[in-house]
Image (spheres, grey):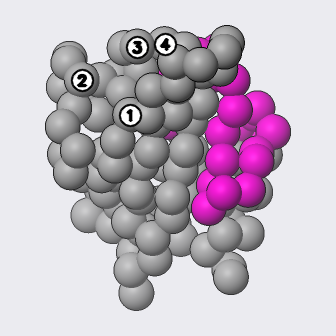
Amino acid sequence: MEQLLTIDIDTSDQQLAADIMSNGSEPKVGARIRLHDDLSIRFEGHYLRRLGNHPDTLSLLVSIQSEAVIISLVNYLFDRIDGRFAELRVNRKKVELSRDQALLAIGDALQK
Protein backbone atom coordinates (compact mmCIF):
# COMPACT_ATOMS: atom_id res chain seq x y z
CA MET A 1 0.00 0.00 0.00
CA GLU A 2 1.42 3.37 -1.00
CA GLN A 3 2.03 5.88 1.77
CA LEU A 4 2.98 9.50 1.18
CA LEU A 5 5.23 11.63 3.36
CA THR A 6 5.95 15.32 3.05
CA ILE A 7 9.55 16.20 3.87
CA ASP A 8 10.49 19.86 4.23
CA ILE A 9 14.13 20.88 4.49
CA ASP A 10 15.13 24.38 5.56
CA THR A 11 18.47 25.25 4.00
CA SER A 12 20.62 28.11 2.76
CA ASP A 13 22.40 25.77 0.31
CA GLN A 14 21.22 26.65 -3.20
CA GLN A 15 22.64 23.39 -4.64
CA LEU A 16 20.89 21.04 -2.22
CA ALA A 17 17.72 20.46 -4.29
CA ALA A 18 19.81 19.50 -7.32
CA ASP A 19 21.91 17.13 -5.22
CA ILE A 20 18.85 15.43 -3.70
CA MET A 21 17.20 15.03 -7.09
CA SER A 22 20.52 13.95 -8.69
CA ASN A 23 20.19 16.13 -11.76
CA GLY A 24 22.93 18.76 -11.38
CA SER A 25 20.64 21.78 -11.65
CA GLU A 26 17.58 23.15 -9.85
CA PRO A 27 14.85 20.55 -10.46
CA LYS A 28 11.45 21.50 -11.83
CA VAL A 29 8.36 21.10 -9.68
CA GLY A 30 7.05 17.59 -10.24
CA ALA A 31 10.46 16.10 -11.06
CA ARG A 32 10.67 12.56 -9.72
CA ILE A 33 13.44 10.11 -8.94
CA ARG A 34 12.94 6.45 -8.17
CA LEU A 35 15.37 5.10 -5.58
CA HIS A 36 13.84 1.64 -5.38
CA ASP A 37 10.81 -0.18 -6.75
CA ASP A 38 9.00 0.78 -3.55
CA LEU A 39 10.45 4.28 -3.05
CA SER A 40 10.33 7.51 -5.04
CA ILE A 41 10.83 11.21 -4.32
CA ARG A 42 8.98 14.02 -6.09
CA PHE A 43 10.23 17.60 -5.91
CA GLU A 44 7.35 19.82 -4.75
CA GLY A 45 9.14 23.15 -4.76
CA HIS A 46 11.85 25.47 -3.50
CA TYR A 47 10.29 28.22 -1.41
CA LEU A 48 12.49 31.28 -1.12
CA ARG A 49 12.40 33.47 1.95
CA ARG A 50 13.85 36.88 1.24
CA LEU A 51 12.78 38.65 4.43
CA GLY A 52 15.08 38.46 7.40
CA ASN A 53 17.79 35.90 7.79
CA HIS A 54 15.69 32.75 7.30
CA PRO A 55 16.73 29.74 5.21
CA ASP A 56 14.76 28.67 2.15
CA THR A 57 12.55 25.56 2.26
CA LEU A 58 12.75 22.57 -0.08
CA SER A 59 9.60 20.47 -0.18
CA LEU A 60 9.61 16.81 -1.20
CA LEU A 61 6.82 14.26 -1.49
CA VAL A 62 8.02 10.74 -0.76
CA SER A 63 6.10 7.68 -1.91
CA ILE A 64 6.81 4.54 0.11
CA GLN A 65 5.19 1.22 -0.71
CA SER A 66 7.10 -0.89 1.80
CA GLU A 67 8.46 -0.04 5.24
CA ALA A 68 11.55 -2.05 4.31
CA VAL A 69 12.86 0.94 2.32
CA ILE A 70 12.77 3.48 5.18
CA ILE A 71 16.46 2.96 5.98
CA SER A 72 17.33 3.46 2.30
CA LEU A 73 15.39 6.73 2.27
CA VAL A 74 17.04 8.08 5.42
CA ASN A 75 20.52 7.09 4.23
CA TYR A 76 19.93 8.61 0.80
CA LEU A 77 18.72 11.91 2.26
CA PHE A 78 21.35 12.21 4.99
CA ASP A 79 24.18 11.40 2.57
CA ARG A 80 23.09 14.54 0.70
CA ILE A 81 21.81 16.89 3.40
CA ASP A 82 24.06 16.21 6.42
CA GLY A 83 25.59 19.51 7.52
CA ARG A 84 23.68 21.44 4.84
CA PHE A 85 20.32 22.10 6.49
CA ALA A 86 18.91 24.07 9.40
CA GLU A 87 15.72 22.11 10.03
CA LEU A 88 14.01 18.96 8.79
CA ARG A 89 10.28 18.26 9.07
CA VAL A 90 8.39 15.06 8.29
CA ASN A 91 4.68 15.67 7.80
CA ARG A 92 5.18 19.08 9.45
CA LYS A 93 6.76 17.58 12.58
CA LYS A 94 10.25 18.90 13.37
CA VAL A 95 12.92 16.20 13.45
CA GLU A 96 16.18 16.37 15.40
CA LEU A 97 19.23 16.73 13.16
CA SER A 98 20.34 13.08 13.11
CA ARG A 99 19.83 9.95 11.02
CA ASP A 100 18.43 8.03 13.98
CA GLN A 101 15.84 10.69 14.79
CA ALA A 102 14.84 10.96 11.11
CA LEU A 103 14.43 7.19 10.95
CA LEU A 104 12.19 7.24 14.02
CA ALA A 105 10.14 10.20 12.73
CA ILE A 106 9.54 8.58 9.34
CA GLY A 107 8.61 5.27 10.96
CA ASP A 108 6.19 7.06 13.29
CA ALA A 109 4.64 9.02 10.40
CA LEU A 110 4.02 5.79 8.48
CA GLN A 111 2.32 4.20 11.48
CA LYS A 112 -0.32 6.97 11.62
Q: Tell whether label 2 touches label 4 (CB within 8 Å).
A: no
For the point 51% across and 64% down, which residue is it? 5
In the image, residue 18 above or below residue 71:
above
Viewer-nearest of labels 4 and 1? 1
Left or right position of 106 against 93: left
In the image, is residue 91 part of the stretch drawn in magenta? Answer: yes
Per the image, the residue denoted by label 4 is 13
First in residue order: circle 3 vs circle 1: 3
Q: Tell whether label 4 touches label 3 (CB within 8 Å).
A: yes
Q: Which amino acid type corresponds to the residue marked 2 in the rendered image?
A: Glu
Which contiguous range is marked in magenta?
77-100
Q: Which amino acid type corresponds to the residue marked 4 in the rendered image?
A: Asp
For the point 68% across and 82% down, which residue is it? 112
Mark 3: few, some, or many residues within 10 Å (few <14, many ≥20)? some
Residue 12: % across, % down: 54, 14
Which residue reaches farthest front?
Answer: 51
Label 2, secondary structure: give it.
Answer: loop
Q: Is residue 33 visible?
A: no
Left or right position of 16 against 84: left
- Give the number of the disc on residue 26: 2
Label 3, secondary structure: give it.
Answer: loop
Per the image, the residue denoted by label 3 is 14
Per the image, the residue denoted by label 1 is 46
